[in-house]
Image (tube, helix red, strand yellow):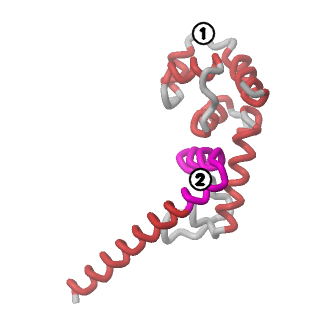
Amino acid sequence: MTSTHDDEVTWLKAKFASITNKADWARQHQLKGGPSMLSQHLSGHRPLSMDAAITYAAAFGVPLSSISPRLARLQERATAVSQRSGGRATTPKGRQPSGTEVPSPRAMSLALRLDALSDARRSRAFALVDLTLRTIEAEEASAKTNARSRSA
């Protein structure tokens, strides 16, 4: 375990010290992975995911940075990237970004996974994502063109 991971485990243990039924807590707050995941977080066997950290922050009414400065920094980076790109990464099509868009837990999880890759592998992953998005956009444009020609 890293010291960052140790700090996250210590914070969680302190918060859960007074909670007698942790399994009920996990179910009540819909922690993904349920009681088993909570146990793994408390024992330090699993690092916190963005989704889990957000669940804990919401349940305890604290900022994400209180639980995991590591994930809070990642969220800030992802939000900054999203804002620089005009919110495209997190804003549904047709909606203007508000400047306060927050990446979804799934986007944050992917960002963490990408961040862990070497530069060469990260570059390859981005190229594959770009190719996939271009393919999807081309398919959508083609479907719109076909729909217009059928209705004309």
Q: Residues within 10 Å of mark 1 (few under 14, many from 20)?
A: few
Which quadrant holds residue 150? bottom left
From the viewer's perspective, tell me whether residue 140 is left or right of residue 49.
left
Decide which of 64, 111 is in the foreground and name it: 111
Magenta residues, start to end: 104-126
Question: How far apart are the alpha carbons under marks 2 and 1?
Answer: 44 Å
Q: Earlier in the sequence, mark 2 or mark 1?
A: 1
Q: Position of residue 18 (x, y in %)?
A: 68, 12
- Amino acid type for the residue under numbered disc 1: Thr
Q: Residues within 10 Å of mark 2 (few under 14, many from 20)?
A: few
Q: Position of residue 61 (x, y in %)?
A: 69, 33
Residue 119 in magenta stretch: yes
Residue 139 in magenta stretch: no
Given this view, does label 2 or label 1 mark the residue nearer the observer?
A: 2
Q: Which mark is residue 120?
A: none
Residue tagged 2: 121
Q: Residue at the location (53% across, 46% down)? A: 106
Query: Dominant secondary structure of the magenta stretch?
Result: helix
Q: Residue furthest front?
A: 120
Image quarter of the C terminus: bottom left
Q: Is residue 68 above or below residue 77?
A: above
From the viewer's perspective, tell me whether residue 91 is left or right of residue 79.
left
Q: Position of residue 40 (x, y in %)?
A: 58, 20
Callout 2–callout 1 Cβ contact below 8 Å: no
- Amino acid type for the residue under numbered disc 2: Arg
Q: Position of residue 20 (x, y in %)?
A: 60, 9
Q: Residue at the location (70% across, 47% down)? A: 74
Residue tagged 1: 20
Which quadrant holds residue 91? bottom right
Q: Residue at the location (51% across, 16% down)? A: 23
